[in-house]
Amino acid sequence: VDPTRRELLSATGKLLLLTGAAGIAWEHVLAGSPEAAPNYQRSKHWWAMLMDVDKCIGCGKCVRACKAENDVPLDARYFRTWVERYQVPPVDPRDPQRESLPLVDSPNGGYDGFPDLGAAASGSKTFFVPKMCNHCAHSPCTQVCPVGATFESEDGVVLIDKDYCLGCRYCVQACPYGCRYIDPRSNTAEKCTLCYHRITKGLTTACCEVCPTGARQLADLKNPADPIHAYLREHKVQVLKPGMATGAKIYYANLDGSVR
Amino acid sequence: MTGLPGVEGFMYPNEIELQWSILIVLYPYLTGLVAGAFILASLERVSGVEALRPTYRLALLSALAFLLVAPLPLQLHLGHPERSFEMYLTPHTSSAMAMFGFVYLWYLMAVLVVEIWLDYRKEIVHWSQTETGWTRWVYRAMTLGSTNVSPAALALDDRVGRLVTIVGIPSAFLLHGYVGFIFGSIKANPWWSTPLMPIVFLFSALVSGIALILLLYPIVAWAKRLPVSMRCLDAMGGLLLYAFLIDFALEMLDLLHRVYEADESFKTLDFMVHTKLYFPHIIVQIFLGTLVPIGLLTLAKVVKLGESGRRGLYLTSAVLVLIGIFAMRWNVVIGGQLFSKSFLGYTTYKLHFAAREGLLPALLLLLLPFGILLVLLRLLPPYAHFTHEEGAGPA
């Protein structure tokens, strides 16, 4: 039986409504609800990280893992972590006073690893430096945020409430380490969260998880059993730009003085 | 990163894109014009510099016109302008930017609008009774229900107005000094981070505000077919010269300090000034925008020139100063983002034309205050004392 026009319109209308509702519901399913971490107590942790420059091989796994885990745009201008390659030229005995700057590169943030330098690097001291947010205890980015959208959590992680961020970019200017960017999709500031969704469930960060040499190690300074304590007792470590007095909590072992 | 267009040497990857555009250049520029114009007006009111009297009301109205536009470039720049009101509702007290919102509001509502209202109150009451049509209703609303213009009431207006001006001068200093602090307090950026920044911003604001009125006064007078008070122009020219000498001395002090200390950022900044910033900094800001007008203004003071000669020198200087101070804001805001915080590389600012943060909206925002000023001039004519009789007051 051919449907009447009224029946056809009614059926189409219902179908449209149902599809719309299903679409919205599906979006909700995809977005998921905020993950709960019922056993996590913020006051019991104080997060930091240890980077061993001598162990980093510049493979870029951490950069790829971070982008995948945290939905970072796959563009060469947005990174929550990246790797730099330093080539520090040797002192020339014939002209020791001549100051030569290190050559630094980070193609696509080290996402694809690094091209071989070949003979170009001969004579230079070459090493890789993984970089990310320093989760400063006195973070300049938090200080300048006009609405408090970025904050230091009780467990020592600098986070951003992107539903509150104005996108004024003052924090991007205030970070001495270049760790922040504006996500072109949300028009809000973004940065490393120290994989907060993972560490609050007893996991390590995505970058530490995939690092094949253990160059990156998540550390909990409030946990007396954390191996970081023994490491800090027995090794010389440094933070980036100590003169900035930001209370940076990414400790670098074997860091060269030329690194900025 | 090497190999990227517009990048020399090494930038941290997140630094390649500039964060603050020409709109953020406009913001301190417009705010500076406000503060400068207001301080000029206050000088007449509080210090009784009689020669400046013709420009008193024009300066106040110009300050208001520019102040109304000053936050617009910020709004247009925000990723989420709809959330900007949060700065007032839930301000973060350690943020210079959040506190600026309150300084701005204080200055607009408690100083500028009140001072203009008190100064015009007698006329507003008069117009509300004599005008016809819709303007009558506008003036009626502007009386705020207060129609008492007895000598006692006017004397009270004057006393309160003087008090507002006295509060207003430090407020104007605060307004623009604060803009300087927004940049000067960023320790991550050596091009910005200097305690001199607020005071350099303040004096450059004063200079630009005087230049604006020095330019607007003869133009408005010419448009209204009113004679221009040469005594007023001379006074403004002199004031501009002295303010400029202080401003230039402060900037040179900053430069000297940087060169002498030569800290770790020096080579990078020095290289930038000699390459990417050479034209806007050395040529436009220092040479055309500072040395040439200082020379011209000195010439007008020491050489015996006729009225038209002096007028020509003043107007040329005013135009150059307005361009030079714009270049100064550009060099601070854009210049501060052209080098890497690793001190190992440089990026390029690409100015688009018809984009949200492009040249076109910037030009429109720069023209908008003049449009507002036209309305204000129509509504609150400042011509009553526009030309004091030459030689009537104390010289």
Image (cartoon, rainbow, N blue to C red):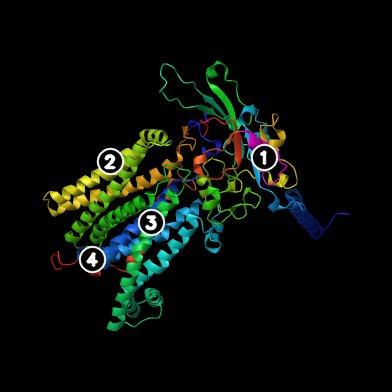
Label 1 sits on what residue type?
A: His
Q: Which is more toward the observer, B334 or B350?
A: B334
| Whole-percent x, y for residue A46 in the image | 66, 47
| Whether label 4 touches label 1, CB < 8 Å | no
Q: Which residue is mark 1?
A: A229
- In the image, is A22 to the left or to the right of B22? right
Q: What is the distance, in whole Å, between disc 1 and disc 2 at their CAs? A: 58 Å
Q: Which residues are magenta?
A: A217-235
- In the image, is B340 to the left or to the right of A250? left
Label 2 sits on what residue type?
A: Phe
Mark closer to the chain start, 4 or 3: 4
| Whole-percent x, y for residue B379 in the image | 34, 69
Q: Which is more toward the observer, B150 or B248?
A: B248
Label 3 sits on what residue type?
A: His
What chain does badge 3 belong to? B
Could you say which quadrant of the image residue A108 lies in? Answer: top right
- In the image, is B260 to the left or to the right of A209? left
Q: Which residue is mark 2?
A: B287
Q: Which is more toward the observer, B2 or B163?
A: B163
At x 35% / y 36%, what residue is drawn?
B278
| Whole-percent x, y for residue A255 in the image | 57, 31
Mark 1 surroundings within 10 Å by alpha-carbon count, few (fewer than 14), some (14 through 19), many (20 or more) = some
As helix, strand or loop, the secondary structure at mark 4 comes to helix
| Whether label 1 touches label 2, CB < 8 Å | no
Say whether mark 1 and mark 3 are on the same chain. no
